[in-house]
Image (cartoon, helix red, strand yellow):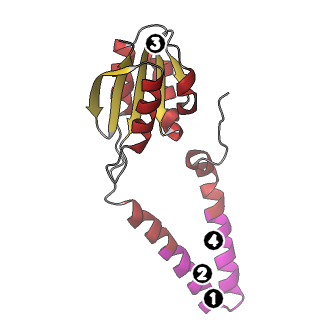
Amino acid sequence: ATVKPLLVARFLLVIVPGLALLAAVGIADLADRGRRAGAAAVLAGLLVASAVGVTQTWGRPTLEDWRGAVAYVADNAAPGDVVIVVPSLAVHPVRYYLERSGADGVELDSPDDVGEIEADRVWVISRDRPDGRRDGPALVALRLEDVQLELAGSRQFANVLVQRYERP
């Protein structure tokens, strides 16, 4: 069963204009009541909070080539192949591009279900972590070895690694 979270940033983006108007009305009301120092403090606090949020995202690699990784899988996958995405939260862009790729018979599966996989070929698509560690794919690899699948190849894309496991 696919779980679709409701509180995702892209969904909450719709309410930003309303929140901005609400904040502006509140600050204007404070200024109208003669509490200009309070209004200035609230406005300064909002600006600082916004600046901190923006500066924390600077310098972090955000470009991930999901399109290229999924296109590679779709071009080389066969019906009955399974795709596992690590971490599982990154399944959204993979599902989006996989649905549009025309790859028939390729199914997305959860990393939790690795021990029950009966497919002859499994693709593991993993997002690079900022610290360079690859714990998730390594754990999935150990579980794939338990079901007699061996690493047959890998390809690196921008901040995304694709690994292909096959039965010997």
Residue at x 53% of width, y 23% of height: 108
Position of 148 with respect to 9 (left or right) is: left
Crowd tier of the residue under label 2, counting other residues whose Cα lies within 10 Å: few below 14, some 14–19, many 20 or above? some
| Residue designated by label 4 | 24
Which quarter of the image is occupied by the C terminus? Answer: top left
* Amino acid type, residue under disc 2 in the picture: Val
Residue 104 shown in magenta = no
Between the residue at mark 4 and the residue at mark 1, the CA separation in whole angstroms equals 13 Å
| Residue designated by label 2 | 42
Residue at x 50% of width, y 74% of height: 47
Between the residue at mark 4 and the residue at mark 3, the CA separation in whole angstroms equals 47 Å
Kindly check if marks 1 and 3 are in contact, taking CB atoms under 8 A apart as contact: no
Looking at the picture, does residue 93 appear above or below residue 123?
A: below
| Residue designated by label 3 | 102
Between the residue at mark 2 and the residue at mark 1, the CA separation in whole angstroms equals 6 Å
| Residue designated by label 1 | 38
Looking at the picture, does residue 103 appear above or below residue 97?
A: above
* Amino acid type, residue under disc 4 in the picture: Ala
Between the residue at mark 2 and the residue at mark 4, the CA separation in whole angstroms equals 10 Å
The spot of residue 90 in percent (x, y) is: 49, 38
Which SS does the magenta portion mostly show? Answer: helix
Kindly check if marks 2 and 1 are in contact, taking CB atoms under 8 A apart as contact: yes
The spot of residue 142 in percent (x, y) is: 43, 32
The boundaries of the magenta stretch are 20-48
Which quarter of the image is occupied by the N terminus? Answer: top right
Instruction: Tell me the mark number nearer the camera, choosing from 4 and 1.
Output: 1
Instruction: Tell me the mark number nearer the camera, choosing from 1 and 3.
Output: 3
